Every structure is written in structure tokens, then in C-alpha cells.
Image (tube, coloured by chain):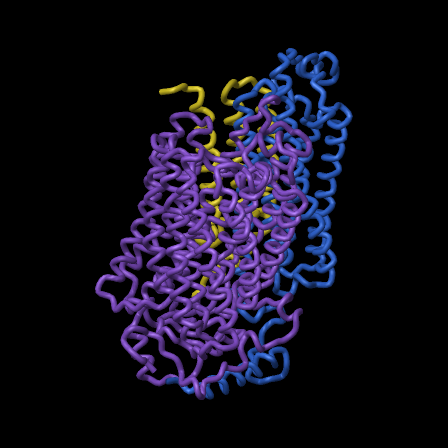
Amino acid sequence: MNNNNNTIVDLPDQATARIPQPNFISKENGLMSWLLTGDHKRIAILYLISITFFFFIGGALAGLIRLELLTPQADLMATDTYNKVFTMHGIIMIFLFLVPSVPATLGNFLIPMMIGAKDLALPKVNLLSWYLYMAGGILALYAMMTGGVDTGWTFTTPLSTHYVNTNVITTGFAIFVAGFSSIFTGLNFIVTIHKMRAPGMTWFRLPLFVWAHYAASILMVLGTPVLAIAIVLVMLERAFGIGVFDPAKGGDPLLFQHLFWFYSHPAVYIMILPGMGVISEVISTFSRKRVFGYTAVAFSSVAIAVFGFFVWAHHMFIMGISNYAVLVFSLLTMLVAVPSAIKIFNWAFTLYKGSITFETPMLYAFGFMGLFTIGGMTGVFLGASGTDIHLTETYFIVAHFHFVMVGGMLMAFLAGIHFWWPKITGRMYPEKISQLAAVVTFIGFNLTFFPQFILGVLGMPRRYASYPPEFQVLNVFSTAGATILGVGYLLPVLYLIWSLKYGAIAGNNPWQATGLEWQTQSPPLTENFTVMPVMDHEAYDYEWLESQKTKEVASAG
Amino acid sequence: MSEQTKHAEHEHHIVGPMVYVAILLALLVGTALTVWASFLELGPWNPIIALAIATAKATLVVLFFMHVKYSTKLTKLTVVAGIFTFLILVSMTLADYISRAWGSW
Amino acid sequence: MPDNSAIVHDAQESASAANNANGANSAHLEHPSYLRHHFNSTEQQADTSNFAMWLFLLTEVMFFGGLFTAYLIYRNWYYPAFVAGSHQLNVIWGTLNTVVLIASSFTMAMGVWCAETRRRKGLVLSLTLTFILGLCFLGIKTIEYREKFEKHHVPGAHYSLQSFVDPTSDPDIFKEYHDKPLPLDMARHTEIYFSLYFAMTGMHALHMIIGIGILGFMIYRARAGAYTSGHVTFVENFGLYWHFVDIVWIYLFALLYLISRHQ
């Protein structure tokens, strides 16, 4: 029943609607049926719970950082402790939250459904991925609680190998293990997308969400092993003094940075590409229009993945690489911005003359488009080596990556969670409070991180517990914003859990969206489809959707 | 489902023992060759020859022992993608190290 | 609006069909027991697992790739140290190991052929030979490592520069290569050579050990005929892994052992 023109939500009659039985949640009961599952949807939920847990630990650490920075002196905690706090904040947020966020939750849940398959290609490997993630996460927490690490999430040598007394090896090993989780997830996605598509599901009929995950998966598979070997070498250097990063024995500390950033730059694309996939789906649905320039968006996802491998040394401009390397990497960095910009243009043209409504996923998507654009543009200042020399290692960098990662990626993640919540749980979240939370998040985010751009340009360095007193006012604004942001992130946890019991029954397709996942029951069956779907229409085909409704098709899938 | 059955050709093509014996002999010859070459004084050519022979041996293993010659385009593309990414890592990192010696412009 | 009760009804029907998967339900298609239910055909399953193994090998290429990158950089920087270090490796053991591994790749490939042509005894023999050759490789490696340990060429607290600042103190090597003494700082860089030697051959040996372990399991299953009744993917995919490990060694041999052996 379409109540008014301000929303596209179309729910079944709540008086008679029931959660369909059986579904993948009710099919089997008991802890073991979840811990030993091969069902990609259950694994997605296991991941969702675990990454939320780690997110709040990382968030608490962020709170501690902002509390310390309320005053210019290092008065809340010792400087060594502060070093540990920002290091663990980075490690947890990047490796235990952002990298798995969309792929391991939404990607796992949706990719088989979007391509018309019953599961991922390698269900046992999928479960192994989750266990590796948990092992890495628990080990990281153990390292944190037994002394922590204070090298920064970047483990720069020779600090990490020769000068600190903290749990570098344990944390390094934790990331090593978690890295394999990521590798196996990416491997699973690539194989699935190549080999398990339903009849008629050609590459160019795939939802752009799938293309985005395909590109991110290539990065996971090819990039993460290099991080693994970099960590192994750090561990060997620390434990045995092998000399590869030790200048006294002829080693070059910069070699670590080459190996580390060879992964860690593609890592930022691993983090953002799946979010961009979510945005494509959300913007299309809430503009009732196919994504403008489908092919361009699909190819730009792959282009981001490919070019992303050529630019890593822009993280090392001031570290001692040769001037010629600086020049080459700076030029290449300008190139890699282009495909991202293409996507923003395409989304904007999707909105143009679309029939736009402002449900919560769309609010987050708008937030993404604005904040990611700002973050991306400031990346250009950093890619230009001349300006980078002044801005690097200042709060400008901190602001830049928080704009793209939090203003961009985290908003995209929340957009996706809200968009597919009815599909995963069968229930709608409460719209008004969720819209409020989105707005609160947006305001809190800008108040937290925009002052940091100014602080960076003014010269405040990053990773310091104390700072010159003239920077205090902007830091106070930033901390105030962080408080608001915290509220904005807490609200979804509360109302989403509330909705599990009290949310409206969603039905198959509350958003009237295209995509195979919306043509099945909510929550879906364990095997997703009773009959293998045959794809006979293009992606984002809203005319096809209209014809489906008039046909009164009753069966699921 | 018909799309997937078309790509089963590598299973239907069974590589026979004679091919394997031939490759084995080629690899052994290559090994002898590369050891012999390392005892010669060839200046900068020593490492180039050693790597060239190693690459030739590796190519034989990939094409015949690992059946890539008889595999799908996807498999061949996958192998190339791996080699390409490895070469990017090596060459762009080495480029930094080599160009450090060139000084400041 | 779709009728929810119809959805529920259909779902229950399909659920009961799925539950009777291995039973006598006539609606259920005949298929080999090893076909997993999320696949449509054995070809799709075999194709998929083959592709998955290739992607895994790509990750291995990049993993070893980092070590090769480090090696190439330091060999470029410290060539004399690398030459001196390389002379400490016995080229006979190295060549023998290379021959052993190439032979094991041959026997592994023959194993795949036996599985494909359903020769159970041939498969068991091939896998057993591969297993033995793998153990030979590790045995020779142990001999080499032990020698390094005895001569204090293992990087770390007990590393000794003696053989490099004074080559005459090492008569066996000196008689072959007549190395000149290295200046002290270049001699120190030999420790990086050995670090990379141990890291690369050690990582390689670790992969060999894992491979040999899986081979043991495979021999046990092959004897029961598990791989000679049409389901060859495990053997094929393991073969890919084994050949990859061989290729890594081909490059390690060329780079670590054969730097420059001319007098």
C-alpha cells in the first residue's frame, strides 16, 4: 500500500502479514547450526555481529583520543598510552571493521542472491574466513590488553623493529591471520561471480554492487599477500635481527614501507569499492531510475582496482624515495582519481530527473556523495607532491582519510544495512528515528572532521598527544562533534535490535527495487531460490518490475 | 548451466605421459645448462641468462605440467594477471631504488 | 500483492525436497555423491575448484613476490656480499635438489594422468614417488641448513663474519673460489643474504612440508580408489600447488645458488 508520494515503501497489510516460514534463520536452531554453517547468509550475520563488536571498541578508542585532545597538554594519559590508543584505533577500525564491513556482511549475504546462485562457490572456505577473522580479532584484542602496540597502524620500521617494547609481533600476527580471512573472502567472490551466475545473467546484467565487489576482491587477492610478507619480515627482524630493515646491517627501512603500502593503498580501495556498490543500488532505487552510464560505472570499478596498484608510494613522498619515484607516483595518483570521479558524475546523473525520495538509505547515500567528494578532492592535494610535503603527517591527512572512510565508507555501510535490513530480517527499521540518526551522524561528522582540515593546514601534526595551545578551539569543536557522532552511531544499534521484534513486516520487496534478491521472500530461504532464476532483463529495469507486478506472480524466485 | 559445461575442455583433454617425459627431459637439460652457465664469466649476462633459463623452465611447467596450454582463456588470463601484478611490485619498487642514485634531478 | 501463503506453501515443498536429497525421492535428480548441492553439475564444480586453486596460487605468487623484491634490491646493492654468501652454498646439493623437485613434478603430473585414466595403482605409485622425492628434498635441505648452523651463518645473535673477512679460514670454499676478503661493512651485508636465503628457502620448505602432509593423506585416499572413479579435482588441484612450489624453487636455485660461480 503506497501511502503517499514521499516514500516508495510498499509494505504488506500488517494485520495479516507474517514472517515467511521456513527461512534461513528459522530453518535450523542451536548454536552449532550457526557456528558450523555453510550458509552464506548465516555467515554474513556472524560477521555483522562481530564487526559491530569491534567497531564499538575502535569507537571507544576514538573517544579516548578526542578526550585527550580537548586540552593542549598530554594530561589525560601518558604519551606512550596515547600512542597505543591511536594505534589500536587504526588497526581495529581498518583491519577489523572497514576491510570486512560491506564485503563480509552485505557481500556475503547478497552476491549469491544477486547472481541467482544458491550459495557462494566455496561455503566451507567462507566459514573459515569468519573463523580466521575472529582469531585475528581476538588475538589483536589480547595484544591490546597485554600492553598494546604504539607504532601507529602503519608499523613503520625501524621504530617497530628496533625501538619499541610493545606487542608488535602479536599484533602483527593477528593482522596476518585476519588478512587471510580477507584473501579467502575475495577469492570466494571472484570464483562465485565467474562461475555461478544463473542462466541469462551476463556480466553486463549484473548489479553494480557485484561489479564493485569483484573489483575489490581482485585487490584482496593480489594485494593482501604482500602485507602478509611485510608483517612476516617485521616479525623476523624483531625476533631474530635478520637485518632486512636494519641500517646497521645494510638493510633499508624503506623496503618495509614499499611492501606495506603496496597492500595498504589498494586496501583503501578494498574498503571503498564495496561501499560504492551499495551507493549504486541505493541511488538507483530511490530515484526509480537505472544507474546512468552502467558500463562506465562497471569499468571504473575495475579501473580503480587496476590503477590502485600503481600509486602506493604517494604515502612515502617524504620518506626518502627518489625524486623520480615521487614524480612518477604523483602523476599516477592523479590518474587514479578519475574513475572515482566518473562514478560520482554517474550517480549525480542518475539523480537528475529521477523520482527522488528521502528514506534513510538515501539520506546516507547523499551524505556519502557530498563527504566522499570532499574527501576525494582533498586527496588530490595530497597526491600533488608539492603540497603533500606540507600537509603530510598533519591533521589534514587525518581529516582526508576520515572523510573518505567515515563520511564515505561508513555512511555507505549504514546505507546498505538499512537498505537490505528488511531482506535480511524480514522486518522494517523505524523510519523516523533512523532518519534522525542519519542527520545526527552527518552533523556530528562534519563538526568532528572539518576543523581537522584547518588544523592540518595550520600545521598541527598527527599522532601527538599534546599540541600548541592556539589549536585548542578547533580541537574542542572536533571533540564536540565526536560526541554527537557517537550518538548517531549508537542509535542504529538500538533501533535495529528493537526492529527485530517490533519492526513492521517487510514482505518481499518493500522498496520496489529491481534485483533478484528482492524477488524472493524476506528473510530468504536457505537455498535462496526454489527454482533457478533465469535472467531475461537488464539490471535496474524498472519497466520489468512494473510488468512483474501486473502479472501477479505468486511464487518466490 | 550450459555456459559452465562449455568450459570443461581442459578436463576432456588429457595430457599423455609422452608429453610429460619430454618436458621432464627439457627441464633437466635446462638445469644442466644453467649450472654450466653459472661457471662461465659472462659479466652482466650471467644473471640475465640464469633468469631466462629459469623462466623458460617455469613456462614449461606452467604450460604442460599445470595444463595451462589446454586450459580456458580465464585460466590463462589469471596466470597473466598474477605475473603482471608481481612485475609491477618488483619493477616499480626497484625503480625507486635504482633512481635514488641519480640524485636530485 | 503476492499471496504470502502461496510463498510459504512453495517454500515448504522445496524444503522437503531438499531434505530428501539423498533419499529415494523420485523428484531428486541422480548425481554423484561428491556433487555439492549449490552446484548444477560436476563440470561446474570441477571448473570452479580449479579456478579457486589458481586464484590461491596467485596469492602465493604475491606472497613470495615480496621476498623476491627484497632479494633483488639487496643483491643490486650488495653484490659482492651476495656472491660471497652464494659461494657458501653447495652447488651440488642445490642442483640435486632441483633435479629431485623436477622429478617430483613429473611424478605428480603422471599421478594426475593416472587419476584421469582411472589407473588406481599407477596413481598410488605416482603419489608415493612424489612423496618420497619431497622427503628427499627436505632431507637435503636439512643437511644444508645444518651446515649453515655449524658455520655460524644463521642470521641473528650468533652470526659470524669470519668466513667473509678472512676467506682463508674456510679452506673448502676458498679452494674452490679463491674469494678476496670483503671489507667489514660489505661483510656485514652477507647477513642480509643469509636472512633472505633462510626466509625464502624456509618459506618454500614450509610449503613443501604442507604439500607432503597433504600427499600422505592423498595416498591413503587414493588406495581406497577415491580419485580414480571420475572425481579427479583434488589430485589435479593439488598438482597445481605442487608444480607451483617447484617453480618457486626453480627461481630460488637460479637466484641464490648460481649468482656467480666462476673463478
The blue chain is C
Q: Is residue A143 above or below residue A438?
A: above
Q: Is residue A44 above or below residue C251?
A: below
Colour chosen for chain A: purple
Give x and y (percent) for residue A286: 32, 67
Can the viewer see residue A557? no
Residue A301 left/right relative to A249: left
Which residue occupies the foreground of this view, A405 or A239? A405
Which residue occupies the foreground of this view, C15 or A194? C15
Q: Is residue B86 above or below residue C38?
A: above
Which residue occupies the foreground of this view, A48 or C232? A48
> Which residue is at a point 42% across and 51% down the rendered structure image?
A481
Colour chosen for chain B: yellow
Q: Is residue A360 above or below residue A462?
A: below
Residue B99 left/right relative to A83: left
Instruction: Check the picture and name the quadrant holding the N terminus of chain A.
Output: bottom left
Give x and y (percent) for residue C223: 74, 60
> Which residue is at a point 54% across and 56% down the rendered structure image?
A56
Which residue occupies the foreground of this view, A424 or A328? A424
